[in-house]
Amino acid sequence: MQRILITGALGQLGLEFIKYFEKSDVYVLATDIRTPSEKLSCEFEKADALDKDRLDQLVKKYKINTIYHLVAVLSANGEKNPFSSWNLNMNSFQNIVEISLDNNIKKIFWPSSIAVFGTDSNLDFVSQNPSMSPETIYGVSKLAGEKLSSYYFNKFGLDIRSLRYPGIISTDTLPGGGTTDYIIEMLNAAKNKSDYTCFLSEETKLPMMYIDDAIDAAIKLMSVERKKLTISTSYNVTGFSITPSELENQIRSRGFDIKIDYKPDFRQKIANSWPKKIDDSSSIKDWEWSCNFGIKETLDRVFS
Ligand code: AKB
Protein backbone atom coordinates (compact mmCIF):
# COMPACT_ATOMS: atom_id res chain seq x y z
CA MET A 1 0.00 0.00 0.00
CA GLN A 2 1.22 3.48 -0.79
CA ARG A 3 1.76 5.56 2.35
CA ILE A 4 2.21 9.11 1.17
CA LEU A 5 3.68 12.13 2.93
CA ILE A 6 2.67 15.47 1.39
CA THR A 7 4.75 18.48 2.43
CA GLY A 8 3.37 21.96 1.78
CA ALA A 9 0.00 20.24 1.84
CA LEU A 10 -2.07 23.37 2.44
CA GLY A 11 -0.95 25.02 -0.81
CA GLN A 12 -2.73 25.03 -4.17
CA LEU A 13 -1.42 21.63 -5.32
CA GLY A 14 -1.36 19.99 -1.90
CA LEU A 15 -5.05 20.51 -1.17
CA GLU A 16 -5.93 19.15 -4.60
CA PHE A 17 -3.73 16.07 -4.14
CA ILE A 18 -5.47 15.43 -0.81
CA LYS A 19 -8.87 15.62 -2.57
CA TYR A 20 -7.64 13.26 -5.27
CA PHE A 21 -6.19 10.67 -2.86
CA GLU A 22 -9.38 10.74 -0.75
CA LYS A 23 -11.00 8.68 -3.54
CA SER A 24 -8.18 6.15 -3.79
CA ASP A 25 -6.80 3.38 -1.68
CA VAL A 26 -3.71 5.10 -0.24
CA TYR A 27 -2.77 6.43 3.17
CA VAL A 28 -1.96 10.17 3.29
CA LEU A 29 -0.15 12.21 5.92
CA ALA A 30 -0.40 15.93 5.15
CA THR A 31 2.13 18.34 6.66
CA ASP A 32 2.48 22.09 6.47
CA ILE A 33 3.97 24.91 8.50
CA ARG A 34 0.45 26.37 8.74
CA THR A 35 -2.59 24.95 10.51
CA PRO A 36 -5.54 23.87 8.32
CA SER A 37 -8.51 26.25 8.45
CA GLU A 38 -10.87 23.28 8.25
CA LYS A 39 -10.59 19.58 8.96
CA LEU A 40 -8.78 17.64 6.24
CA SER A 41 -9.86 14.24 4.96
CA CYS A 42 -6.46 12.77 5.93
CA GLU A 43 -4.05 12.77 8.88
CA PHE A 44 -2.36 16.16 9.45
CA GLU A 45 0.80 17.07 11.36
CA LYS A 46 2.19 20.57 11.60
CA ALA A 47 5.82 20.47 10.45
CA ASP A 48 8.42 22.83 9.04
CA ALA A 49 10.08 21.24 6.00
CA LEU A 50 13.36 22.79 7.16
CA ASP A 51 13.17 20.71 10.35
CA LYS A 52 14.78 17.51 9.13
CA ASP A 53 14.51 15.63 12.43
CA ARG A 54 10.80 16.30 12.71
CA LEU A 55 10.15 15.11 9.14
CA ASP A 56 12.32 12.07 9.70
CA GLN A 57 10.32 11.16 12.85
CA LEU A 58 7.05 11.55 10.95
CA VAL A 59 8.27 9.38 8.07
CA LYS A 60 9.18 6.66 10.60
CA LYS A 61 6.06 7.04 12.75
CA TYR A 62 3.66 6.82 9.78
CA LYS A 63 5.72 4.25 7.82
CA ILE A 64 5.84 6.53 4.76
CA ASN A 65 7.06 5.02 1.48
CA THR A 66 6.25 7.83 -1.02
CA ILE A 67 6.70 11.61 -0.74
CA TYR A 68 5.05 14.49 -2.59
CA HIS A 69 7.36 17.36 -1.71
CA LEU A 70 5.42 20.52 -2.62
CA VAL A 71 7.03 23.15 -0.40
CA ALA A 72 8.25 26.20 -2.35
CA VAL A 73 8.33 29.98 -2.39
CA LEU A 74 7.00 30.84 -5.87
CA SER A 75 8.47 33.21 -8.45
CA ALA A 76 7.09 36.63 -7.47
CA ASN A 77 7.31 36.16 -3.70
CA GLY A 78 10.77 34.67 -4.12
CA GLU A 79 12.12 37.91 -5.55
CA LYS A 80 11.14 39.77 -2.37
CA ASN A 81 13.68 37.77 -0.37
CA PRO A 82 15.92 35.64 -2.60
CA PHE A 83 18.10 34.36 0.25
CA SER A 84 15.30 32.96 2.39
CA SER A 85 13.59 31.60 -0.75
CA TRP A 86 16.71 29.72 -1.78
CA ASN A 87 17.06 28.45 1.78
CA LEU A 88 13.52 27.09 1.91
CA ASN A 89 13.38 25.72 -1.62
CA MET A 90 16.77 24.01 -1.58
CA ASN A 91 17.24 22.95 2.03
CA SER A 92 13.77 21.42 2.25
CA PHE A 93 14.60 19.54 -0.97
CA GLN A 94 17.89 18.29 0.48
CA ASN A 95 16.10 17.22 3.69
CA ILE A 96 13.64 15.15 1.69
CA VAL A 97 16.47 13.53 -0.28
CA GLU A 98 18.43 12.58 2.85
CA ILE A 99 15.34 11.33 4.68
CA SER A 100 14.36 9.30 1.62
CA LEU A 101 17.75 7.64 1.40
CA ASP A 102 17.75 6.87 5.15
CA ASN A 103 14.21 5.49 5.16
CA ASN A 104 14.15 3.60 1.88
CA ILE A 105 11.49 5.85 0.34
CA LYS A 106 10.46 4.33 -2.97
CA LYS A 107 9.36 7.40 -4.95
CA ILE A 108 9.28 11.17 -4.67
CA PHE A 109 7.19 13.64 -6.64
CA TRP A 110 8.66 17.12 -6.78
CA PRO A 111 7.20 19.86 -9.00
CA SER A 112 9.49 21.95 -11.14
CA SER A 113 8.29 24.90 -13.21
CA ILE A 114 8.44 26.80 -16.49
CA ALA A 115 10.55 29.22 -14.43
CA VAL A 116 13.62 27.07 -15.21
CA PHE A 117 13.81 28.49 -18.73
CA GLY A 118 14.97 31.98 -19.65
CA THR A 119 15.47 34.26 -22.60
CA ASP A 120 18.09 31.86 -24.08
CA SER A 121 15.46 29.12 -24.40
CA ASN A 122 13.55 30.09 -27.60
CA LEU A 123 10.52 31.16 -25.63
CA ASP A 124 8.12 30.96 -28.58
CA PHE A 125 8.15 27.17 -28.29
CA VAL A 126 10.36 25.75 -25.59
CA SER A 127 11.80 22.30 -26.18
CA GLN A 128 12.53 19.73 -23.47
CA ASN A 129 16.20 20.49 -23.14
CA PRO A 130 17.12 23.96 -24.40
CA SER A 131 19.78 26.25 -23.04
CA MET A 132 18.42 27.44 -19.66
CA SER A 133 19.22 30.63 -17.79
CA PRO A 134 16.46 31.26 -15.22
CA GLU A 135 16.06 34.86 -14.10
CA THR A 136 14.34 34.38 -10.74
CA ILE A 137 15.63 32.74 -7.58
CA TYR A 138 12.63 30.39 -7.84
CA GLY A 139 13.72 29.34 -11.34
CA VAL A 140 17.33 28.97 -10.25
CA SER A 141 16.30 26.77 -7.31
CA LYS A 142 14.01 24.66 -9.51
CA LEU A 143 16.78 24.15 -12.07
CA ALA A 144 19.22 23.22 -9.28
CA GLY A 145 16.64 20.73 -7.94
CA GLU A 146 16.25 19.23 -11.40
CA LYS A 147 19.99 18.74 -11.75
CA LEU A 148 20.18 17.25 -8.25
CA SER A 149 17.30 14.87 -9.03
CA SER A 150 19.24 13.54 -11.98
CA TYR A 151 22.45 13.34 -9.92
CA TYR A 152 20.76 11.47 -7.03
CA PHE A 153 19.14 9.06 -9.45
CA ASN A 154 22.47 8.24 -11.09
CA LYS A 155 24.38 8.11 -7.81
CA PHE A 156 21.88 6.42 -5.45
CA GLY A 157 19.02 5.23 -7.67
CA LEU A 158 16.72 7.69 -5.86
CA ASP A 159 13.50 7.85 -7.87
CA ILE A 160 12.50 11.55 -7.96
CA ARG A 161 9.88 12.32 -10.62
CA SER A 162 9.13 15.82 -11.72
CA LEU A 163 7.02 18.00 -14.00
CA ARG A 164 7.73 21.51 -15.19
CA TYR A 165 4.34 22.95 -14.39
CA PRO A 166 3.01 25.98 -16.24
CA GLY A 167 0.52 28.27 -14.44
CA ILE A 168 -2.04 26.07 -12.68
CA ILE A 169 -5.67 27.15 -12.72
CA SER A 170 -7.85 26.34 -9.73
CA THR A 171 -10.41 28.67 -8.28
CA ASP A 172 -11.25 26.72 -5.09
CA THR A 173 -7.69 26.53 -3.85
CA LEU A 174 -5.59 29.61 -4.40
CA PRO A 175 -1.91 29.88 -5.31
CA GLY A 176 0.27 32.43 -3.58
CA GLY A 177 3.00 34.62 -4.89
CA GLY A 178 3.32 33.39 -8.48
CA THR A 179 3.59 35.27 -11.78
CA THR A 180 0.82 33.23 -13.41
CA ASP A 181 -1.60 34.04 -10.53
CA TYR A 182 -3.23 36.77 -12.63
CA ILE A 183 -5.32 34.16 -14.45
CA ILE A 184 -6.93 32.95 -11.23
CA GLU A 185 -7.41 36.49 -9.97
CA MET A 186 -9.13 37.52 -13.23
CA LEU A 187 -11.38 34.46 -13.23
CA ASN A 188 -12.35 35.01 -9.59
CA ALA A 189 -13.03 38.70 -10.31
CA ALA A 190 -15.39 37.64 -13.13
CA LYS A 191 -17.14 35.15 -10.84
CA ASN A 192 -17.51 37.79 -8.13
CA LYS A 193 -18.51 40.50 -10.66
CA SER A 194 -15.74 42.78 -9.43
CA ASP A 195 -13.28 44.94 -11.37
CA TYR A 196 -9.75 43.69 -11.87
CA THR A 197 -6.35 45.29 -12.42
CA CYS A 198 -4.03 42.86 -14.14
CA PHE A 199 -0.34 42.98 -13.18
CA LEU A 200 0.77 41.70 -16.61
CA SER A 201 0.31 43.46 -19.96
CA GLU A 202 -2.52 42.45 -22.33
CA GLU A 203 -0.26 40.57 -24.76
CA THR A 204 1.77 38.44 -22.31
CA LYS A 205 1.32 34.88 -23.54
CA LEU A 206 2.00 32.17 -20.96
CA PRO A 207 1.29 28.44 -20.78
CA MET A 208 -1.41 27.31 -18.35
CA MET A 209 -3.00 24.08 -17.18
CA TYR A 210 -6.25 23.24 -15.41
CA ILE A 211 -5.75 21.74 -11.94
CA ASP A 212 -7.32 18.38 -12.84
CA ASP A 213 -4.76 17.95 -15.61
CA ALA A 214 -1.96 18.99 -13.24
CA ILE A 215 -2.97 16.29 -10.72
CA ASP A 216 -3.63 13.72 -13.43
CA ALA A 217 -0.18 14.32 -14.97
CA ALA A 218 1.57 13.81 -11.63
CA ILE A 219 -0.37 10.63 -10.87
CA LYS A 220 0.36 9.23 -14.35
CA LEU A 221 4.04 10.07 -14.09
CA MET A 222 4.24 8.48 -10.63
CA SER A 223 2.58 5.28 -11.76
CA VAL A 224 4.65 4.50 -14.85
CA GLU A 225 7.58 2.06 -14.68
CA ARG A 226 10.83 3.96 -14.12
CA LYS A 227 12.51 2.25 -17.05
CA LYS A 228 10.08 4.02 -19.42
CA LEU A 229 11.35 7.43 -18.28
CA THR A 230 14.13 8.79 -20.47
CA ILE A 231 14.38 12.06 -18.53
CA SER A 232 15.65 12.19 -14.95
CA THR A 233 15.46 15.97 -14.50
CA SER A 234 11.86 17.10 -15.14
CA TYR A 235 9.30 16.71 -17.91
CA ASN A 236 7.70 19.56 -19.87
CA VAL A 237 3.89 19.53 -19.67
CA THR A 238 1.31 22.03 -20.83
CA GLY A 239 -2.39 22.63 -21.26
CA PHE A 240 -2.90 25.73 -23.41
CA SER A 241 -1.31 29.16 -23.88
CA ILE A 242 -3.20 32.39 -23.45
CA THR A 243 -2.71 36.16 -23.02
CA PRO A 244 -4.62 38.30 -20.50
CA SER A 245 -6.54 40.01 -23.33
CA GLU A 246 -7.51 36.66 -24.88
CA LEU A 247 -8.72 35.57 -21.46
CA GLU A 248 -10.65 38.84 -21.06
CA ASN A 249 -12.36 38.18 -24.43
CA GLN A 250 -13.22 34.64 -23.39
CA ILE A 251 -14.69 35.89 -20.13
CA ARG A 252 -16.74 38.56 -21.96
CA SER A 253 -17.99 36.02 -24.51
CA ARG A 254 -19.49 34.16 -21.55
CA GLY A 255 -21.54 37.19 -20.56
CA PHE A 256 -19.39 38.63 -17.75
CA ASP A 257 -19.16 42.39 -18.15
CA ILE A 258 -16.29 43.30 -15.81
CA LYS A 259 -13.88 46.20 -16.05
CA ILE A 260 -10.26 45.09 -16.50
CA ASP A 261 -7.29 47.45 -16.36
CA TYR A 262 -3.70 46.62 -17.13
CA LYS A 263 -0.94 47.94 -14.88
CA PRO A 264 2.16 45.76 -15.37
CA ASP A 265 4.42 45.62 -12.30
CA PHE A 266 7.71 43.82 -11.48
CA ARG A 267 6.11 40.51 -12.45
CA GLN A 268 6.08 41.57 -16.12
CA LYS A 269 9.85 41.17 -16.29
CA ILE A 270 9.55 37.65 -14.87
CA ALA A 271 6.82 36.75 -17.38
CA ASN A 272 8.96 38.10 -20.24
CA SER A 273 11.59 35.49 -19.38
CA TRP A 274 9.10 32.61 -19.43
CA PRO A 275 7.88 30.46 -22.35
CA LYS A 276 4.91 31.34 -24.50
CA LYS A 277 4.41 27.73 -25.52
CA ILE A 278 5.83 24.41 -24.39
CA ASP A 279 6.80 21.31 -26.31
CA ASP A 280 5.61 18.39 -24.18
CA SER A 281 6.26 15.65 -26.75
CA SER A 282 8.69 13.77 -24.44
CA SER A 283 5.90 13.40 -21.87
CA ILE A 284 3.51 12.21 -24.57
CA LYS A 285 6.05 9.69 -25.84
CA ASP A 286 7.46 8.37 -22.53
CA TRP A 287 4.39 8.13 -20.31
CA GLU A 288 1.46 8.82 -22.63
CA TRP A 289 0.62 12.23 -21.22
CA SER A 290 -2.45 13.82 -22.73
CA CYS A 291 -4.19 16.96 -21.62
CA ASN A 292 -7.98 16.98 -21.20
CA PHE A 293 -8.60 20.67 -20.52
CA GLY A 294 -8.16 23.35 -23.17
CA ILE A 295 -9.35 26.89 -22.50
CA LYS A 296 -12.99 25.98 -23.29
CA GLU A 297 -13.10 22.99 -20.95
CA THR A 298 -11.29 24.97 -18.27
CA LEU A 299 -13.75 27.86 -18.41
CA ASP A 300 -16.71 25.48 -18.54
CA ARG A 301 -15.46 24.03 -15.27
CA VAL A 302 -14.51 27.34 -13.65
CA PHE A 303 -17.90 28.93 -14.40
CA SER A 304 -20.05 25.82 -13.80
C1 AKB B 1 4.63 30.90 -10.58
O1 AKB B 1 3.99 31.72 -11.26
O2 AKB B 1 5.62 31.20 -9.88
C2 AKB B 1 4.20 29.45 -10.62
C3 AKB B 1 4.92 28.67 -11.65
C4 AKB B 1 4.60 28.81 -13.07
O3 AKB B 1 5.79 27.91 -11.31
N1 AKB B 1 2.79 29.36 -10.86
Image (cartoon, grey):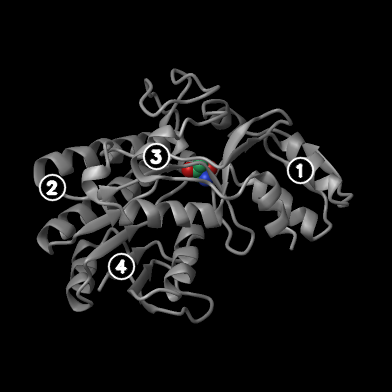
Q: Are marks 2 and 1 in contact (CB under 8 Å)?
A: no
Residue 157 circle label: 2
- Residue that appears at 35% across and 63% down: 7
Decide which of 218, 33 is in the foreground and name it.
218
Vertical arrangement, residue 298 with respect to residue 133, above or below:
below
Vertical arrangement, residue 110 with respect to residue 28, above or below:
above
User: In the image, is the residue at mark 4 within 8 Å of ligand 1 by its beta carbon?
Assistant: no
Which of the two marks, 1 or 3, is nearer to us in this view? 3
Q: Residues within 10 Å of mark 3 (few under 14, many from 20)?
A: many
Q: Which residue is mark 1?
A: 197
Location of residue 231 in the rendering, given as x and y in whole percent from the top left corner: 28, 36
Residue 283 circle label: 3
The residue type indicated by label 2 comes to Gly
3D distance between C-alphas at marks 1 and 3: 35 Å
The residue type indicated by label 4 comes to Leu
Decide which of 270, 123 is in the foreground and name it.
123
- Residue that appears at 36% across and 69% down: 31
Q: Quadrant of the C terminus?
A: bottom right
Location of residue 283 in the rendering, given as x and y in whole percent from the top left corner: 39, 39
Q: Which residue is mark 4?
A: 5
Which of the two marks, 2 or 4, is nearer to us in this view? 2
Q: Are marks 1 and 3 in contact (CB under 8 Å)?
A: no
3D distance between C-alphas at marks 2 and 1: 48 Å
Location of residue 15 in the rendering, given as x and y in whole percent from the top left corner: 48, 66
Which of the two marks, 2 or 1, is nearer to us in this view? 2
Residue 240 circle label: none
Q: Are marks 3 and 4 in contact (CB under 8 Å)?
A: no
Q: Earlier in the sequence, mark 3 or mark 4?
A: 4
At numbered mark 4, what does the secondary structure look like: helix, strand or loop?
strand
The residue type indicated by label 3 comes to Ser
